[in-house]
Image (spheres, rainbow, N blue to C red):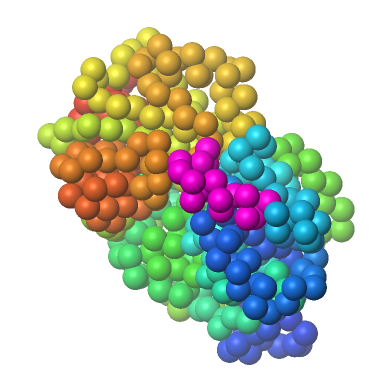
Amino acid sequence: MGLTLAEKIFLRHSSKKRLEDFVYSNIDFCFANDITGPLAVKQFYKITEKRVFNSKRIAFVCDHFTPAKDKNSANNVAFLRNFSLRFKIPNFFDINQCGIEHVFLAEKGFIKPLDLVVGADSHTCTFGALGALAIGVGSTDLAGVMATGTCWFKVPKSLKFIYKGRLSKWVSAKDLILYTIFKIGVDGALYKVMEFSGPVIKSLNMEGRFTICNMAIEAGAKTGIIEPDGKTFNYLRRVAGLKLQGLNRRLKSDPDASYEEIYEWDVSNLEPQVACPHLPSNVKPVSKLSSVKLDQVVIGSCTNGRISDLRVAAKILKGRKVKSNSRVIIIPATPNIYKQALKEGLIRIFIEAGCIISPPTCGPCLGGHMGILGKGEVSLATTNRNFIGRMGHPESFVYLASPAVASASAIKGRITHPQEVVG
């Protein structure tokens, strides 16, 4: 019996010659943020105060509450900075050179195909788009990894998703993953690897692939993964500056690999999708929601804060104004994306349309800051979760959609199909 790509990566990182139900693995890279990092450091000190396993393979990315929203947030960043100085960890990133971790770390070239990566954040699965096995862990597990460079796992089963057909205009990777979660539910991939494949996946650019893998966790998955191909390696050379000599570029799932289930869908007739409160699986076509009025629109996050997302938003917003009683917040995911958006004139388009531009931050996605909802308020966001109270008040409402739908909706002040605005 053959192995899936995820199983091959587990095997490569263990000392065993064959894969067993549980595996003790060497970790290539680990990271935490300004919320989970301090918890991990406190647990680390219970293990050892002498050394970390490899200072260059640990990163702290202060993205959740930065720029610091209060004294506790500021103290968390200072705590991580001091730990990094003590153990000579060079990859400490504060607001002067920081971004949303799941975008920023890929952009910086810390993760490559076939790596085994753990992060103290559930959306670590984003890096599966690079052909890495990227798994979110708790802060205590991360402490163990920082001390030993190893972690144990129960090897998950894999589900395979094959997408066929051709995407219609204004349908994107965000719509694909929302549709997938709708079909299988928020527990449909519980502790499984979601392997995304098929001609539609191959046609996506890397930014779309990141979006797909980012939301695997919203179906309960252990992680998501896409086999690396020419687009993957071109991205890593062009964006991250990696040379990738000696990397096996043909490592894929075996033809006879075992999957717990295989899903195959033709998505040619799919229209833009919207997740309604209060679950990412409560998905409806955008055409069914035109009566939903909005107080706020957020375009950003580790799901959809990349330059291609901002380009789509600018294409729709150019020469138009957002609804006068709506707050529209644009959050570039990293400083490089912000600079590129400035260079291309996108920021000017957003400002002239009446949007608010935030520095790179997770901010409102987790109800942190830079866009918290009040009681009864309704938001449409390009983020990844819409649980009760996720973006602020427990009696607020969050809808999830693509940048195209979010931008069109910002103009109309209600949930809107992009073709209603630009055709």
Above/below status of 316 relative to 284:
above
Which residue occupies the foreground of this view, 268 or 135? 135
Q: Residue at x 40, y 24 (%)?
A: 356
> For the point 22% across and 26% down, which residue is it?
413
Q: Residue furthest right?
A: 245
Q: Is residue 71 magenta?
A: yes
Quadrant where the C terminus lies?
top left
Residue 55 visible from this viewpoint: yes
Residue 382 image-quadrant placement: top left
Q: Is residue 75 left or right of residue 373?
A: right
Residue 121 x/y as whole percent: 52, 60
Residue 108 position within the rendered picture, expressed as x and y whole percent measured from the top left: 71, 44
Position above or below: 88 against 417: below
- Please report the residue visible at 27 percent of the width from the left and 53 percent of the height from the top: 389
In the rendered structure, the answer to whether residue 268 lies left or right of residue 360 reads: left
Q: Which region is colored magenta?
A: 66-81
Q: Residue furthest left?
A: 291
Q: Nearer the viewer, residue 413 or 59?
A: 59
Classify residue 349 as left or right of residue 79.
left
The location of residue 386, given as percent across then percent down, is 30, 51
